[in-house]
Structures are given as structure tokens and as C-alpha cells.
Amino acid sequence: MTMKEEEEMKLILNGLEYKEREKVWIAHYPWIKDPHQLPNNFGVAMMKLKGTEKRLRKLGGIRSAEYSEQMINIFRENPVAIIGDISKMFNSVRLSEFDSHVHRFLWRDFEDRAPDHYALTAVPFGDICSPAIAVLAMRQTADKYKDDFPIPANIILKDSYMDDIIHSLDDAEETPETMQDVEFILKQGNFHMKEWIVSGRTQAEEVVDLSGTTSEKVLGVVWNPKEDEISYKIKLNITPKQKTSVPCTVTGTDGSDRELPNDLTKRRVLSKISTIFDPLGLVTPVTLCGKLLLRQIILYTCDKDRKLDWDDPLPKELGENWYKFLQNITRLETLKIPRCIRTTELVKPTLIMFNDASTLAYSACAYARWQVGSGKYIARLLASKSRLAPIKIQTVPRLELASAVLSARLRNTIVEESNIKYDYIYHLTDSEIVLAQIMKDNLNVGTYVANRVSEIRETTSKEEWHWISTEVNIADLMTRPNLQVNIDAGSYWQRGPDFLGLPTTEWPIKAIPLNTEEKTIISTVGISKVCIKQCSLFDIDKFRSYRKLIRVTARLISAFRERSLKGISLSLTGEQLKEAETLWIKCMQVPLQDNWQVRFKRLGPFCKDGILYVGSRIATWMKSNYNNEAFILLPTTHKLTDLCIKDVHDRDHGGVDSTLCKLQAKFWIPQARKLIKATKSRCVTCR
């Protein structure tokens, strides 16, 4: 849009008066894309209205991208689907006079004339807070007319994503009236609909992209309004530069050849797997294979001997698997899934959740089931989620528990966002261990299990959980890679296991019986008591300073030698302080004297003047690096060790490495880093 067009639409104002103290200007540069036009780009140097942003972020109820999958799920619930597009949503919201002053800029068409003073009068595209402002204005408009038009207002509040209205209706005859009421409410807030697209209409020939953008670089779920089907469009994104080395071709579903780059890199495979936009998880068994292949690349680069940058060609063993995957995903273009999950009225709707896990991944999926006749039922896939198992090896029961948590979260998302009220909900798993953990009230387990079981109990009921065998657990398809799995519209994956078409009394499920009686476990433990003679001059726990302890000890030694209390008042010398410190070190090392040659063999220990030292193996290296031939060995668990570390730390309150370096100038303490961290955490000055 040019400057002239913006001025004609009153989006900018020329000559807005302002007070001298209110001069605020923003940078406004032309984005030269076409030599015949100079489009505006306020995002180049647009100032951030931080106060407005913080205020808007505190306001709840504004939808973000995380709700897109729930909206598409609601979009599949009813037979008639409608999509509306709001025209120039940002520019429909006007700015106040104060906000216009902070959106001033200078502009001139020719260099030989003085620039004109302009100010924006509508919300621009460049501000970070513009989307929140536009959505908030639209929601406030809907709230204002919620009492007079409850259904259309609820559509705007619940089924809108930025400038798109995505909704499904049960009755085709109510569609025109509903669209008119929505348009009427939006017009009251200066919002105008550009167009409506309704499923099944002959004029709806075009294909609508639901991926959140119309850019060809972001491919996503595609809806054909005329056929009322959801499909996938796969584009391999081969640039002209990459086509210079492309000997490998793939035959697509339309008979055309798809080119694949010969030198696949980590950057390219990540780009290609990201093109599959599957928010509902309708093709999760296929996308899981890509995730696992991508993990193989990451694990390959974790080896220090193998360096693989983003633009380095993949090794042969990894590249072959990726070629097979890219050749296989083109079949997703033949996938045609009906948008509406039902063809008849929902009778006795039931939500069935499956979850499973393996050493590779854990997953959960949801199916909606309803009655269509006497004793006959139909089920359809609603959504699925899969997560790769952690790289750090976990036990299968832990992964099964993680899949149960994923199932509970997916169930809550569907129940909260869906307009369908389910009569009953089933959670089916093939792990008896997980079921026992969920069922039992008094569960003495660790933190990991306790936290997850607690979340499951808070969001679900124990009566909803049942056991099924692995053979009929459909979530197993999302835990093991299989590129050849059938995911077509009428497949086992889309309609669910066969037993979902039977009454619940004939399902192959069972509950896990638990014994109500608590069993008392008596353990016999053998205890061996070892007494070690401790050496202590006086109660060291009363001291909080290492220096004070040494000085008090030195004065007591001086008084003992003088055989008079007058020795306490004498000034202390360096030799007396060193003698006191040596005495305490010998007392500390008494517990270490037992079999010290074997216990500290790796440290190169030796005894000199009754004091244990370590470091004889690297004496030359220590002399050149630490200016010391050996370290004095101190025990890990001793009060004086803590005082010594605290004394070194309090000198400059440095970090762990700094304190450790100063400490090792004289002493060697096993687990010193752990003790320094504990001292630093207790330090009030460092908090």
C-alpha cells in the first residue's frame, strides 16, 4: 500500500499539531521491492511501547498459536464449516491522539522539497503489541453485544484466530443468518469481513490453508471446501542452487518426478521435516520416523571424533535412511481425510484415550465414538501426540507413566475446548504397573512417580483407567518407526481398533484388582559399629571463623607454655599461628589415618611430620603450577574443613572456581567443589 492510498484511507494524517514538549519521531524507511512503488516498512526501526506491551500481556483470554490445534479440532465437529477473513484487521483499530503523536514520521516524495509531517491514526503492522491490541479490540466488541447476540458473539470470542473466523455448524439453514450476525457485530467495532468460505458450496473452488500463513514456505493442513476434505501438500523445497547436484528423483503421486539433493545436510533435512504441519497428529506414525532419523543425526554429532556442521553432507549410513523417508512422505498427498468426524447426530458420545511407550518414544491418541444404530458404533481419530524418549536411558515403566500423563493432558485439552459433551471417558493402557500406581492410594514411591501419578489423579478418575493387551493398543503405532503403516481415511489408524464398534461389555479390557489389606514387610538389617577415636581440643562448633579458631588456639598454647594467663595477652607471632593450625590439621586427620595408603592410593599420599599429604606423583607439575610440591589432605566431613572453605570464600566472595583455586594453593579436599557450592549458597552476601 502506497503513501497516497494510506492517506486516502485516513490511516495516516498530514500536519497533526502537537506541543513542543511532545515531539516524538520514529524512523520510517521505504522497503524498495518494486522500483515503481515504495511500500512502507514501519518494522525497521519502530519504537517498542513497553508500557502498553506489559499491560496487554497481563490481560488474559487472548488466544495464541498454541490454541490453533484445538480450533481445528472444533472445526471438525459439525457438518457445515465456515471460514471468514477480516479485512485489514490492524488498520481497523484507531489510535488515540497521544498514540498518534508517538507514531510521527517525516516523508517526502522528492529530494528537492521539504518533508511533510505525518502521523499514524490506525494501529500499524510494525508494533510488537499490534496483534494483541487488534484482538483485544475485537473481543471487547463481541463482549459488548454478547447479551443480544450470544451465539455469534461466542463464535468471535472462541473461534477466532487473529483475522480468521473458523467455525462449524450443525444446520446448513442457519449458516447465512449466523454469518450476517457475526458481520453485524464486527461492523460495530469497525471490522469488516473480506469474504466467507462455506463447505460444500460450488463457488468454493479454492483450497484454504489452515497452517496459520499463506506463505508457500510454511506448508500445512489443507482444506478443500468443495469436497470438504483435509489433505496434505508435500513440497521438498529444492532451491535452484541445490538443483546443480541432484541425481536422485522421486516419483510423486501425480506422476511427476520430485528432485532430491545429492548432498543432504543437517540443515536441509530439518527444513524438509518441518514442512509437514500436523497439529492434530493425524499422520503421527509417519512424522515419528522423521523425528527419530533427526535424533540419529544429533547422536552422531555428539561423538567428539565426529564433527558434522549444519552444511556438511550426511554420512552414507544416515543419508540412505533419509532418502527412503523423503521418498515415502510423498504418499501423504494422496491422503484425503473427511473434515467432519461424524455423518449423523452424535448419540452417546464417548472419548477413548490410548497410551503406550517404548524405548524410542511414548505417545497418546484420542478417539471419539458414538452410536449409529442398534448396537452399532463408529469411532474416528480426533488427535494424537508423541514424544521421543529421553536420550538418557529410562526404564519402560517410567516411559509408560509419561505416556499416561500425556494422555491425561490431551484428554483435558479436548474436553475443555470441545463443544461435544462426552457421556463417558475411557483411558486404556497395556501397562499393569502404571495402572497399579494410579489405583493405589498409599503409594510409597520416589518423587518422579509421585509427581506424575498426582497429576493424573487430579485430572482424571481412577474408574476411567483400564487395561488392554498390546495387540489391540493402537497407540503402539506411534512408538515404533514404520513408514509402511496405512493411515488412509478408512484405515485401522483413522477408525480405531475393531472393538470400538462393539458395546462396551464386549471390549477386551479389564480392571487391575488391588488387595485392600496392607502387608507388613519385615527386613533384617545387620549393623556393624566402628568406633574411631576423635581428637578435639575444645568444642569447635562454637566457632564461626577459621581465623578466630586458630588465634584462640594459639593463645591457649601460649598460656599453657607460660603456665600463666598472662600468655593470653601476649602478641601472637606467625610461628605460633602456624603451630596452632598444624595442631588442628593433625586432629582433623585422625579419622584418615586408618589404611590411608590404600584409601588414597590414586592421589599419591605420603606422611611427613605426622601430616598426610597427597600429590607425590605430580610433584614437578605442582611445583611449576601451584608453587607447591604437595597438598595437605583434609577430610570432607569436618567442621574445620567448612570453616576453612568459608574463610577462603569470604575474602572476595568469588565464584566456585575462584574459591577452589585459592583453596588448592595449600589443601586438597575430596568433593571440594560440592562443599564450596554449599558454602556459597549459605552466604548472605552472595545471595
Image: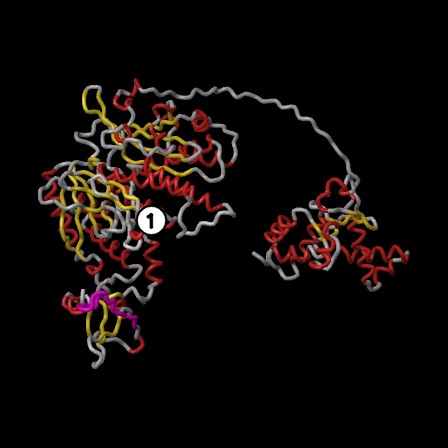
From this view, report whether residue 390 is shown above or below residue 521.
below
Q: Is residue 423 visible?
A: no
Q: Which residue of the protein is positioned furthest toward the top in this rendering? A: 506
Front position in the image: 205 or 340: 205
Membership of 34 in magenta stretch: yes
Stretch in magenta: 25-39
Q: Where is residue 330, by image quadrant?
A: top left
Which residue shows up at 44% across the image and 49% down it? 308
Quadrant, the C terminus: bottom right
Front position in the image: 266 or 204: 266
Read off the residue under disc 1: 271
From this view, report whether residue 439 is shown above or below residue 605.
above
Name the side, left or right, on which 493 lies relative to 653. Answer: left
The location of residue 668, given as percent across then percent down, is 70, 51
Name the side, left or right, on which 416 lies relative to 614. Answer: left
Within 10 Å of the Cα at label 1, are there few (<14), some (14-19), or many (20+) other Cα atoms?
A: some
Decide whether the magenta segment is chiefly helix, strand or loop.
loop
Membership of 370 in magenta stretch: no
Front position in the image: 545 or 427: 427
Q: Where is residue 127, by image quadrant?
A: bottom left
Secondary element under disc 1, as helix, strand or loop, is helix
The location of residue 488, given as percent across then percent down, is 24, 32
The location of residue 68, given as percent across then percent down, is 28, 45
Q: Is residue 615 visible?
A: yes
Which residue shows up at 24% across the image and 62% down it? 123
Residue type highlighted by circle 1: Ser
